[in-house]
Image (spheres, helix red, strand yellow):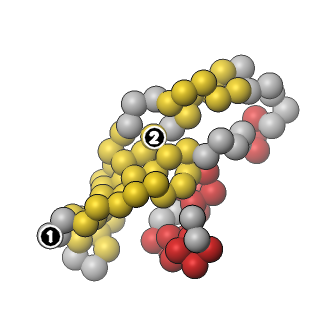
Amino acid sequence: MQDSFKELIKLLLPEIIVDYFELTSYEKDQEILHLYLKEINSIPKEYRESKLSSKGFFDQITVQDFPIRGHQVYLHITRRRWLN
């Protein structure tokens, strides 16, 4: 993701989302904004001591977030499946 674009996303999304997920795409309907996020292949700080490996992804979930400028916001989140 471009650095300037990433700085803009930091203003819109919670810090933990920006740290562990990348924005893969987005769609804007008339009054709805869909943001598609995929977990990056980086072991969380709390589990760096463990030997974890990424083995695919869980099913995508959808979370409704706070509106932005009158548009409903939906986060479509895909998390990694970590094996210990």
* Circle 1/circle 2 CB separation < 8 Å: no
In the picture, the quarter occupied by the N terminus is bottom right
Q: Is residue 76 visible?
A: yes
Q: Residues within 10 Å of mark 1 (few under 14, many from 20)?
A: few
The local secondary structure at tag 1 comes to loop
The local secondary structure at tag 2 comes to strand
Q: Position of residue 73 (x, y in %)?
A: 29, 62
- Identify the residue at horizontal 51%, vertical 38% (top origin): 79
Q: Where is residue 65 in the image (x, y as percent from the top left)?
A: 34, 59
Compared across the picture, whether 26 is left or right of 44 comes to left
Q: Which amino acid does label 2 sit on?
A: Thr
Mark 2 lies on residue: 78
Question: In terms of image quadrants, where is residue 83?
Answer: top right
Compared across the picture, whether 6 is left or right of 27 comes to right
Mark before the other along the chain sequence, 1 or 2:
1
- Identify the residue at horizontal 48%, vertical 65% (top origin): 13
Q: Which mark is residue 69?
A: none
Question: Relative to the observer, which residue lies in front, 39 or 63?
Answer: 39
Q: Can residue 65 be seen in this view?
A: no
Mark 1 lies on residue: 30
- Identify the residue at horizontal 60%, vertical 24% (top origin): 55
**Distance in Å between CA atoms under marks 1 and 2:** 24 Å
Compared across the picture, whether 58 is left or right of 64 comes to right
Q: Where is residue 46 in the image (x, y as percent from the top left)?
A: 75, 40
Number of residue marks: 2
- Identify the residue at horizontal 61%, vertical 46% (top origin): 40
